[in-house]
Each structure stands twice: as C-alpha cells, then as structure tokens.
Image (cartoon, rainbow, N blue to C red):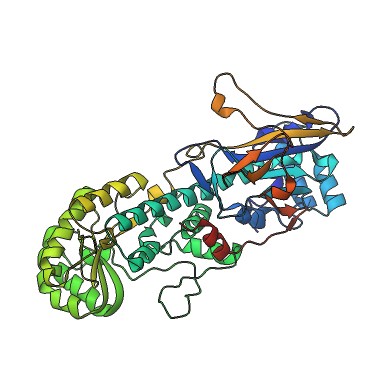
Amino acid sequence: MSVFDNIILATDSYKVSHYRQYPPGTEYVYSYFESRGGKFPEICFFGLQYFIKRYLCGPVVTQEKIDEAADMLSYHLGPDHFNRAGWEHILKVHGGKLPISIKAVPEGTVVPTKNVLFSMVNTDPKCFWLTNYLETLLVEVWYPMTVCTSSRAQKQLIKSFIEKTGGDEAALGGANLMLHDFGYRGVSSVESAATGGAAHLVNFWGTDTMAAMICVKHYYGGGVVPLIPGQDPFPVPGVSIPAAEHSTITSWGRDGELDAFRNMLTQYPTGLVAVVSDSYDVFNACKNFWGKELKEMIVKREGRLVVRPDSGDPPVIVVQLLDILGEAFAEHCTKTATGFKVLPPFIRIIQGDGVSYETLGTILQAMMDANWAAENLAFGSGGALLQKLNRDTQKCAFKCSEITKADGSSVNVYKDPITDKGKQSKMGRLTLEKNADGVLETVTEGKGDPAKDVLVEVFRDGVLLVDQKFEEIRARAKV
C-alpha cells in the first residue's frame, strides 16, 4: 500500500471544510464532469476505470486512516474542521466502502465537447458532502482522457495522409504502428506514464512506455496486438523493437560509426531494428553508410532497418533523408497507385524529435509535396504526447448541478459568471442521449429519457459494476 492511499487525504485542503457549507437539510449532492471545449472538438473518453479500481474499490476507509487524517488536519487547517464523525459513519455503517454512485460514458466512446462524461451522487443521505470531496481525485481523469483524445486525432491525421498519397489497405492498417510512445522519461510520474501511455495504446500499438503495458494488464484486462496476419495475436497491448541510442553508437567513436551500424545489422539479422543515425553527420550516414557500405546487408536482411534522425528541422530533414535513401535504393523503390514514391520494404525512417499534433501534419504535408507517400515514415513522440498538455487543453471541469433536501425537494445548481460565459455549468440531473442526427448531446434538468441514457452506472457503494476490457475500448475508439 502506498503512503498516498489514504482516500481521506486525497483531496484539496479546502474540501475538508465543505461539509458545513451546504444548505440545511441537504441529503444528496449530484455532480458531473465534462470538457467545456478546448483544442479538439470531441473527446475520446478513457481512464476513469483506472482511478476507480486503484483508489475507490472495496473498504478504503479505516480507523487508522481516519486517525492519520485527524492528526494531520488538526494542524494543517486548525482544530475542529475535520469531519471525523462523517468518516467514522462510513466506516461503521458501510464497512469503509464509499457510498457513492458513478455513471459514465463507456470508455473509448467519442463524445462532442460540452457534454457530460460522468456523473456522481452519494447513496447515503448522511454523506452528501462526499460527492464533491472526491472531485480532486476523479478529475485527474482529464489526463488520460486528453492523451487519448490527442492520440486519436493524430491517428486521424496520419490516416488522412495515407489516403491522400495512395496507401493501400496494408498501409492503412500499418497506421497502428506509425506513432510510437517515447514519453516515459518525460512525464511527471510513473502513474502519468502508466495512465497516459495506456491512453495512447487505445489508438496505436507502438510504445516504449512499459508502465503503460502494466496499467492495461492490471486495470483493463490486458490487450492484444494482431501484428502478423494469419497468426494468433500477441498477448500484449503494445509492441516495440530493438533500437540503438546515441550512447551505443557513439561509444564506438566517431571513426567507428560504420562499425557500430554494421554491428546493429549483425546483432539483429532479422526483424525490425532502429538505428539513430545523426550522431555526427546524418547525411553521410544515409548516403554512404546505409546507402553504400551496408547496402547489400540491408537488401539481403530478412527484416526492416528503421533509420532515425534526431535533430534538424523535421519537415526539412525528413524529406532530405527520404531523397537520399530513395536515390541510394532507387532500383528497389516503388510507387503507390496515385504515383507517390515508396521506399523498399526493408528500409524506412522514424522521426522521433519535435513531433506533436501540429508538426505531424507539417511533416506529412512536406512529404506529400515532395511526392513521398506517408507510409514511408513512422513517428515517435514523447513530451508532446504525454506531457505538453494540461487540464485546460480540453477545459475539463467538475460541477455540482443538483442537490436534494430531506423534504424531497430538488434544487437546480449552476454557475453563470458574467465575466466568462464559457464557464456556465449545467443544471439538474443529466442524461447523455443521441439526438435525431445520431449525435450525442446532454439533456439537462432531469428532462432526459433514462432509457436512452448512454451513461452507465460503473461504481456503487465500493463495488465496480462494469469491468471494461481494453479491446472493447479500442473498438469503440476505432478511427
């Protein structure tokens, strides 16, 4: 058990005092989570199940945790602000399980922004204060959700350029391997690597973020990669390949770079292997080392060499290297049905430096302008994929929309700041339904039809009700 697993302390400090601030007679607090807009017009929802399984399931409140919180908070906030009676009620009446109901859109579902993604309400009237107490923890779903949304948008972009440049079905299927996760070292924590990396695997098969594999295995029932047609799928959610880093190349010395390259081809005589090639002179490496000295080894090898530049202006360097390799292996190059050039299947390029949603399109456009098909290139993305985003990327927010009092009356709750209409919140009980055009939209103020509600109860009173499997999520998110 982690020292951070005390659910009582997994909140913002000011929430500890909120149990005294609701109107007299409040018994139920109903709140919801949404993306109010942002960079992308639609959300690919993912990650809530991780947080539920990791932090909410089972008896998560103990006397030891209550005592720890009471001791810390008596100094942190001052005496008499901690709701000891409320937490001891949960321990004694509910056995330490949280009396909360969560309804959520199935993970992997693509939902337009400005719609409810999950809702929460307490199931014990004495625990009305608990709903928004849990906001701090559960709003962290913004992170895997935003990674998943961005990753999916990049897949849409890649596929669009494959189609534009005449790629066949094999090339379109290969899009699953065209954006590789390089982000483990660049994120803020192992948990970020796990949840963000898993979110990327919803859309792609390539990753070097091992924490993502563990997350999918333990929290989403594992995943598969149908990598080789006609064979059983690999029983893992993502794959990678042997690859060189600068230290393994430069340790041979500048004069030994050719030997280092030859060693890579010798050590890995079959399959895919990636070799970083810009340690000194990437143009010389591609023209003379790969294109001349080692050409015969590459052509005869049973597999594919992936050349990796790691510096320079990406749209420029990619086209320059494609031209050099295209000339060196000209007799083996082909064209797509629409006339775009394709390197032979035994050699490709991966661009792993400076790759983001914005630069991805710029690079692919530069390739198309130079008459190169999109399928010649794979991408690696690290910081831009898993770290260069925040809660405001998709303007994620959690808001109370209704309270119910002891007399049975309900009050619509909302905010409507005159200084920012974009922060206006929804009112009442919410459903997420398909409209006449088949588009998901939120029905507010309890006016929706529960039979048409896409939101499904996934958690109630400490128990996970729906255990979503990773391949089901992938199927919903499919481009």
Residue 401, image x and y in percent? 70, 33
Please identify the quadrant where the C terminus is shown.
Answer: bottom left
Residue 133, image x and y in percent? 70, 40
Residue 413, image x and y in percent? 72, 29
Depth order, front residue of 216/60: 216
In the image, residue 142 above or below residue 77: below
Q: Is residue 149 left or right of residue 452?
A: left
Furthest toward the right, the residue is 407
Q: Residue at x 36, y 47 (%)?
A: 357
Residue 469, image x and y in percent? 60, 64
Q: Residue at x 29, y 52 (%)?
A: 353
Please identify the quadrant where the N terminus is shown.
Answer: bottom right
Residue 300 appears in the picture as rendered: yes
Residue 256 appears in the picture as rendered: no
Q: Residue at x 60, y 41 (%)?
A: 441
Snapshot quadrant of residue 292: bottom left
Q: Is residue 273 left or right of residue 191?
A: left
Q: Is residue 367 left or right of residue 220?
A: left
Depth order, front residue of 181/337: 337
Q: Is residue 450 left or right of residue 141?
A: right
Tell how many labels. Answer: 0
Furthest toward the top, the residue is 418
